């Protein structure tokens, strides 16, 4: 499969091509600045491997300036003096402006990440706007509590209450699989609680976050409240995680890097929240609606090219329908239209980078060499771009790399089971991760019994990949600490102060 080099960037409007043609600076203290070192790095289209843009290569010096700007904005600027309602209106306006720039943001996501423009336009961008809209409503609802005291000496009278306060300056580090949406997941709740932010974006996909920075300024966000630094994890990301004036680090990415974040933060015991990897089980019982389960399991693994931390990558199917289900998923996979993201017929684009392409190919190769059998797929495609065939593997064993490790690509491993018993639950939970899971059956009582025993932060019953800004999302075990979205995420960015007054 060879992709025409003119089939991506030439499909976007001239204004966006002009924006990409200029070296893209970072947002620090309300100004667009290049790196102090003067360095830049190139961003590439994963479908063609061609250069899309040059971006400032921030490092520790730029992180330090951004953190100082965030501290000033928190303690000296107008941000902390805004009423909750005013802060909420500003955050809501960010969501409005995201929708007003829907097509442009979707085009940037497609070019930079490789995902289909059609998907970014109906999912990534609207969900990003919704996150700001949803979180804007929480600004006026973050409340403390009056607490009656009962264990005091006789005769004393006290007034005690709690006061939630912003945790302070937050360092946020986001991944490349949903660049705009992950920025929204991080920024919206931090802003709703009154924090200020230094956002370090993935070096593979910085463009939509930089465009979002322009939207933040247009919405009226005060200087320094959000600072966006582009650069590499080993330099800019590490400096942000270890910076002594950062009060909290929020990270989404691999479990391996999450461990490094914790080590860096441990030096001064700054708060940490982590949304990490997954190897999620998707369980189909023999009485399930087979057609619905096949469609759901197909989307569960192949959505976003399998580059989802919650992808249903381990499929468990009851023996009596195993062949039918796996054949159906394989047939669906073989029909997926693969191409450049800006092609309106594309259903699956390339993987995000050469590094990710090599990783997925390597794990696929190891699985096949260890005895797994591909019902469909099993290899890379073509000699240009980072394309991999949607793959369904059977005849796997529990100790295989393809079964144990998070692949983060379009690779499904399918295993039959006899009964929905303790052995099945043990197999489903036999992973270091605990992010998500799926259960397919017409027996809702049985579905909930299974769901209650799965060690996962999200369990979908007769559906998969259902997200909402109001639903908390996060994992058990090595899938992370804390939750994103919903009311639960607010605790990531708040400190609780107890105040007691003697009123005797």
Image: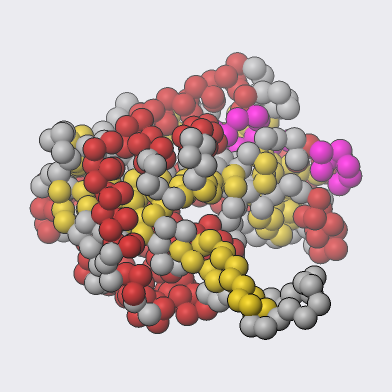
Question: So how many labels did they put on this image?
Answer: 0
- Place of residue 38 in the rendered image (x, y in percent of width and height, measured from the top left): 13, 35
Q: Quadrant of residue 496?
A: bottom right
Task: Report the quarter where the N terminus lies.
Answer: top left
Which residue is rendered at x = 59% and y = 44% of the image?
480
- Asked whether the viewer can see residue 360, the reply is yes
Residue 100 shown left or right of residue 192 in the figure: left
* Magenta residues (range): 403-426
41 shown above or below 476: above
485 shown above or below 476: below
> Between residues 415 and 53, which one lies in front from this camera angle?
53
> Between residues 82 and 199, which one lies in front from this camera angle?
82
Which residue is rendered at x = 88% and y = 42% of the image?
422
Which residue is rendered at x = 86% and y = 46% of the image?
420
Outermost top residue = 369
Q: Quadrant of residue 502?
A: bottom right
- Place of residue 366 in the rendered image (x, y in percent of width and height, measured from the top left): 57, 19
The figure's colour scheme reads secondary structure
Which residue is rendered at x = 57% and y = 34% of the image?
406
Task: Report the quarter where the C terminus lies.
Answer: bottom right
Residue 413 shown left or right of residue 51 in the figure: right
Residue 59 shown left or right of residue 328 in the figure: left
> Between residues 62 and 57, which one lies in front from this camera angle?
62
Q: Per the image, is 413 magenta?
A: yes
Q: Quadrant of residue 151?
A: bottom right
- Asked whether the viewer can see residue 1, the reply is no
- Place of residue 421 in the rendered image (x, y in percent of width and height, measured from the top left): 89, 44
> Between residues 43 and 375, which one lies in front from this camera angle?
43
Q: Per the image, is 52 magenta?
A: no
- Place of residue 395 in the rendered image (x, y in percent of width and height, measured from the top left): 71, 27
């Amino acid at each position: 499969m060879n992709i025409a080099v003119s089939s991506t960037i030439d499909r976007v409007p001239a204004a966006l091509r002009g924006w990409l043609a200029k070296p893209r600076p970072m947002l620090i203290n309300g100004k667009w600045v290049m790196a102090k070192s003067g360095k830049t790095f190139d961003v590439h289209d994963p479908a063609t491997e061609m250069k899309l843009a040059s971006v400032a290569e921030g490092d520790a010096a730029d992180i330090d300036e951004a953190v100082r700007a965030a501290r000033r904005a928190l303690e000296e600027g107008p941000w902390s003096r805004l009423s909750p309602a005013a802060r909420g209106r500003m955050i809501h306006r960010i969501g409005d402006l995201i929708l007003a720039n829907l097509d442009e943001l979707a085009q940037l996501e497609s070019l930079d990440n490789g995902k289909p423009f059609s998907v970014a336009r109906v999912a990534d961008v609207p969900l990003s706007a919704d996150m700001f809209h949803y979180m804007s409503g929480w600004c006026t609802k973050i409340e403390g509590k009056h607490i009656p005291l009962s264990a005091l000496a006789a005769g004393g009278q006290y007034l005690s209450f709690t006061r939630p306060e912003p945790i302070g300056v937050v360092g946020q580090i986001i991944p490349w699989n949903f660049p705009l949406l992950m920025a929204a997941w991080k920024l919206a709740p931090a802003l709703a609680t009154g924090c200020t932010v230094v956002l370090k974006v993935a070096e593979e996909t910085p463009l939509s976050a930089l465009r979002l920075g322009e939207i933040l300024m247009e919405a009226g966000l005060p200087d320094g409240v959000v600072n966006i630094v582009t650069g590499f994890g080993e330099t800019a990301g590490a400096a942000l995680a270890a910076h002594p004036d950062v009060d909290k680090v929020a990270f989404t990415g691999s479990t391996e890097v999450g461990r490094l974040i914790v080590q860096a933060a441990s030096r001064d015991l700054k708060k940490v929240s982590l949304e990490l990897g997954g190897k999620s089980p998707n369980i189909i019982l023999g009485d399930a609606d087979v057609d619905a389960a096949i469609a759901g399991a197909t989307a569960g693994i192949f959505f976003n090219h399998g580059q989802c931390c919650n992808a249903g990558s381990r499929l468990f199917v009851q023996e009596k329908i195993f062949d039918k289900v796996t054949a159906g998923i394989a047939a669906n996979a073989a029909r997926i239209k693969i191409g450049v993201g800006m092609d309106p017929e594309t259903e699956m684009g390339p993987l995000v980078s050469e590094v990710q392409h090599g990783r997925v190919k390597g794990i696929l190769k190891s699985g096949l060499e260890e005895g797994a059998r591909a019902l469909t797929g099993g290899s890379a495609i073509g000699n240009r771009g980072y394309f991999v065939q949607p793959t369904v593997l059977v005849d796997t064993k529990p100790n295989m790399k393809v079964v144990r490790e998070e692949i983060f690509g379009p690779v499904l491993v399918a295993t039959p089971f006899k009964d929905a018993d303790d052995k099945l639950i043990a197999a489903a939970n036999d992973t270091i991760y605990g992010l998500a899971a799926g259960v397919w059956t017409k027996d809702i009582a049985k579905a909930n019994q299974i769901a209650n025993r799965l060690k996962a932060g999200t369990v979908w019953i007769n559906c998969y990949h259902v997200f909402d800004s109001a639903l908390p999302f996060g994992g058990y075990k090595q899938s992370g600490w804390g939750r994103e979205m919903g009311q639960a995420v607010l605790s990531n960015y708040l400190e609780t102060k107890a105040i007691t007054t003697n009123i005797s």
